[in-house]
Amino acid sequence: MLSRERLLLLTRRQLFGRAAVGIGTAALAALLKPELLAAAPVGKSHFPARAKRVIYLFMHGGPSQLELFDHKPDLKKRHGEELPDSVRRGRRLTTMTSSQKAFPVVSSFSGFTRRGRSGAWVSDLLPRLGEVVDDLCIIRSLHTEAINHDPAVTFLQTGHQQPGRPSMGSWITYGLGSENRDLPGFVVLLSRGSAARPGDPLQARLWGSGFLPSSYQGVGFRSSGDPVLYLSNPPGLPRAGRRHQLDTLQQLNRKHYDAMLDPEIQTRIAQYEMAYRMQASVPELTNLDRESARTFELYGPQARIPGTFAANCLLARRLAERDVRFIQLYHRGWDQHYNLPSDLRLQCQDIDQPCAALLKDLKQRGLLDDTLLVWGGEFGRTTYSQGKLEPSNFGRDHHGACFTMWLAGGGIKPGLVYGETDDYCYNVVKDPVHVHDLNATLLHCLGIDHTKLIYRFQGRDYRLTDVHGEVVQPILA
Amino acid sequence: MRAGSEPVARIRHGFRRVTGRLPQEDEIEMLEKHYRRWRDEYRDNPAVALQLLAVGEAPRDPTLDAAELAAWTSVASVLLNLDETISKE
């Protein structure tokens, strides 16, 4: 029975959750019906969704928009000149360059070519991606408030610069629920870029569920060896035996829940059950034996090496086929403070073919129509050189005032270039898209009104977009 | 297993060690049922019990009955994975 103190601690949500679950014998049956659990996903969209799932290709570190998508041929003429104050406008700089004596403009070291029927300019560092440019919506006018990695990544992923709020993947699986009961609704795949440095921070809280029940947190797969550890039962414990063990455990945990009513106990019960089902579903997911030679040709030779970006892109397609709601990839190593020409080339080699392959593959399987593909990092890079500008070497510092991302698939207008930056690629001059606008738009494609996906915590209503965000209508299909 | 010769004594001992409280009657019942099921299985299949006991770095105590030890290993696994063991409410 509930103690008096425990009853006083009950939150409204827990009380209603308990009412829905019922007590006694009904409780055990409810275990198998996750929709009956307290704080169960909202489970329905606000209006018809164009996309059912997301594959988010997060380029961690801040890729240079100047070298990749935002073509500024006139900068060649200004190469080496001081960045005018009228352009810089006193914008906050990071402490890595704020004490520099000079801010010499650097034009892009990479060439650009008009690609596809849309004729969008794409870097020659991304030749394969150029092949699919007619499927992309390139947004050149993203801007963010943060200028350092951790706050910027946290902002893009959670809508707030300080840690603690739910990640976008958690919001979306909370809002829409999961369509595959044998795999987590939110899966995270990590890869190390060829130019990544050991110090690049990437913390698991970025895919945390914040104040949402922890069953909505992202499940990170390991990037080397087995993607999930201890999937096999030990010798001497047959699968039927594992089931019996979990049944006893569940009975005891359920009893504990009835006394405590903490939804986190339900989460633990649900996670044990998920782990049991993953013992069967993950080996099936990661077994690539039945992938054709053509598929490996498409994604490139690295697709056979677990933990590479290419292998993760192929895995992302397999997760999408299995209706996993939110598939988050992180590729590290885009932080080119120095040695930008050589390091950026390496990073582009990592991702160019796999990105294009993923898009083509989703398309040929009919999955692109209802999968939202997102590519981008937490900010862009400065027009001026960090450190000395040398004939064949330079760096670029973090730049939040403008950067480029691309979207493709469910609900997004293909073959579009949206937004404009000034001649120096330093400020947005047309159609600005703030991080909150981007997130509002992504939710919109999934059928979610970003102003209505709300969770009350500690007496305050929270949203992914806080009190901001406008859906970017012109980029919708 | 050395905490008592009767299953209930062992359950009370193990439960208290991991949760800090004594188990209630129905909890003892669930765990005892669990123990009996596994004891029977490992008695019928001694080779399977030995397989389980070979897992891990600590060598098994050969003076203890293998089927019994394997069954109590299963009980211990349940106890160690209780929500109450892992987090304090």
Image: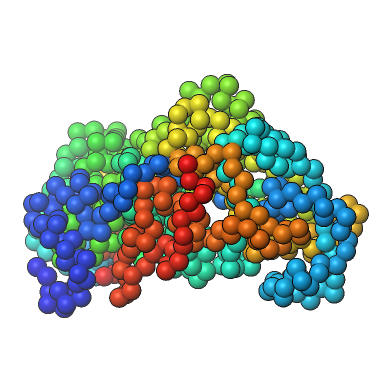
Return the residue found at the far right: A391
Quarter of the picture containing the N terminus of chain A is bottom left
Nearest to the observer: residue A345 or residue A8: A345
In the image, residue A415 above or below residue A73: above
Nearest to the observer: residue A106 or residue A386: A106
Q: Quadrant of residue A468?
A: bottom left
Residue depicted at 79% across the width and 63% down the height: A384
Q: Is residue A413 left or right of residue B47?
A: right
Nearest to the observer: residue A336 or residue B3: A336
Q: How many numbered discs?
A: 0
Pinpoint residue B70: horizontal percent, then vertical percent.
Answer: 27, 45
Residue depicted at 55% across the width and 39% down the height: A414
Q: Quadrant of residue A335?
A: bottom right
Pinpoint residue B67: horizontal percent, then vertical percent.
Answer: 24, 42
Q: Is residue A375 left or right of residue A108?
A: left
Residue depicted at 48% across the width and 51% down the height: A473
Return the residue found at the far top: A293
Pinpoint residue A100: horizontal percent, then vertical percent.
Answer: 81, 73
In the image, residue A30 above or below residue A318: below
Residue depicted at 52% across the width and 69% down the height: A161
Way the structure is coloured: rainbow
In the image, residue A366 above or below residue A192: above
Nearest to the observer: residue B13 or residue A435: A435
Is residue A227 visible in the rendered image? The answer is no
Q: Is residue A365 left or right of residue A106?
A: left
Is residue A37 visible in the rendered image? The answer is yes
Pinpoint residue A393: horizontal percent, then vertical percent.
Answer: 85, 54
